[in-house]
Image (cartoon, coloured by chain):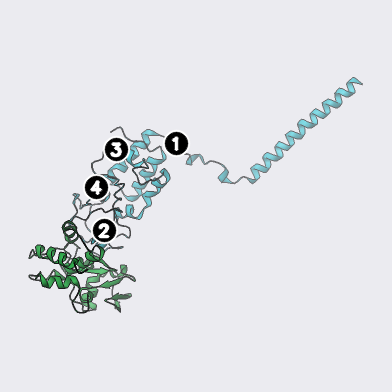
Amino acid sequence: MPLYEIHVNGETKQVDVDSDTPVLWVLRDNLRLLGTKYGCGIAHCGACTIHLDGDAVRSCAYPISAVGNKKVTTIEGLSKDGNHPVQKAWLEHDVPQCGYCQAGQIMTASSLLAQNSTPSDEEIRRAMNGNICRCATYTRINRAIRTASKDM
Amino acid sequence: MFNKTLSLKSFKSTAIVLSMVAFMIVLMAFKVQHNTTSDYLDLSEIKKKDSVASIAAFEKVYSVLMHPRCMNCHPDGDVPLQGDESRIHNMLPQRGPDGKGILTMKCANCHGAVGVPGDATPPGNPHWHLPPADMKMIFQGRSARELALQLVNPEMNGHKSMEELRLHAEDTLVKSGWNMGGDRELPPLSYQEFTKAWYEWIDTGAYAPSK
């Protein structure tokens, strides 16, 4: 198996995996970063969302061979002390119910606000449309993103 | 005296004519010797306009362009289509100004440079995109005539010349229609059959069918 060097949460890691291994399984199985969740495995639910150079990418459908020198950020690396504006707003609005999808929700929301710090409600709905929450916390998610946008 | 003058003139004229003939023979021999094959038109490569052959070829082209593997990314709207039944794409990603999506819903966020194994995983391509917003190049709903006329119009085909249009068949995203993996239905022609029909349609005049 080929050896890959990837940059994850500010650190350089080496992994020895097949070239078509999804980044999700490299993070979870090889690097034991368990915050990123498996949901559907076909990029439809958003639970596995990470950042690749700031873009909200579905790690379940992204092979390790395509990462190259891009910087990988997972929920563990979004902030040092959980004090990213989105994380603080999530606590303020008590967003999660079961919590399974929330890492993906937060990674998508933080990518959105990094690119557009004052999104409209319509832009928030469009940007978050690919992140499914079976507890239907969508209303609180939208409120929290609006709150976080004030701190960005 | 008169005869002598006449014969001298006649001799001079004959000599001039013979010299010219000899010069031309030498010139032709030189040309033949130094001509390369590229100086001659290969009769087999002469592009001959033929509306019947062109329209027949476009019927084949049209069957591929209207297949979900091609049409799904040429929708009559700003959201791509998906699947063999060309349903609206899950999660409603939008075209965006450059055709590559918007914010957290860029095509490349799910369609990586290469895909991962699996029947329903997103197909990969380094250049995944829709046509841009200022030239949507819609296939969905177009008749064969409408689509043929659209394809040859630089104001509607991405500012492509006929030569660029011809080469578009070799675009990696076009090719990926035959390599999306999983249980996705393939276009009705093979890639080789498609390119043959595409080139034939253009080379015989790029005629549009009557309907």
Question: Which mark is nearer the camera, 1 or 2?
Answer: 2
Q: Position of residue B66 (x, y in %)?
A: 26, 45
Given the image, what chain letter belongs to the residue carrying mark 4? B
Question: Which mark is nearer the camera, 1 or 3?
Answer: 3
Residue at mark 4 = B75
At label 3, which amino acid type do we have? Glu
**Comes first in the chain, label 1 or label 2:** 1
Q: Mark 4–mark 3 contact, CB under 8 Å?
A: no
Q: Report which colour depicts chain A.
A: green
Given the image, what chain letter belongs to the residue carrying mark 3? B
Q: Mark 2–mark 3 contact, CB under 8 Å?
A: no
**Comes first in the chain, label 1 or label 4:** 1
- Above or below: residue B131 compared with residue A14: above
Q: Position of residue B15 (x, y in %)?
A: 80, 31
Mark 4 lies on a secondary structure that is loop
The Cα–Cα distance between marks 1 and 4, rounded to whole angstroms, is: 34 Å
**Residue B52 shows in this picture:** yes
Q: Report which colour depicts chain B.
A: cyan
At label 1, which amino acid type do we have? Lys
Q: Are marks 2 and 3 on the same chain?
A: yes
Residue at mark 2 = B107
The Cα–Cα distance between marks 2 and 3, rounded to whole angstroms, is: 28 Å
Residue at mark 1 = B48
Q: Residue at x 59, y 46 (%)?
A: B36
Q: Is residue A121 left or right of residue B102?
A: left
**Comes first in the chain, label 1 or label 3:** 1
Q: Are marks 1 and 4 on the same chain?
A: yes
The Cα–Cα distance between marks 1 and 3, rounded to whole angstroms, is: 24 Å
**Comes first in the chain, label 4 or label 3:** 4
Residue at mark 3 = B146
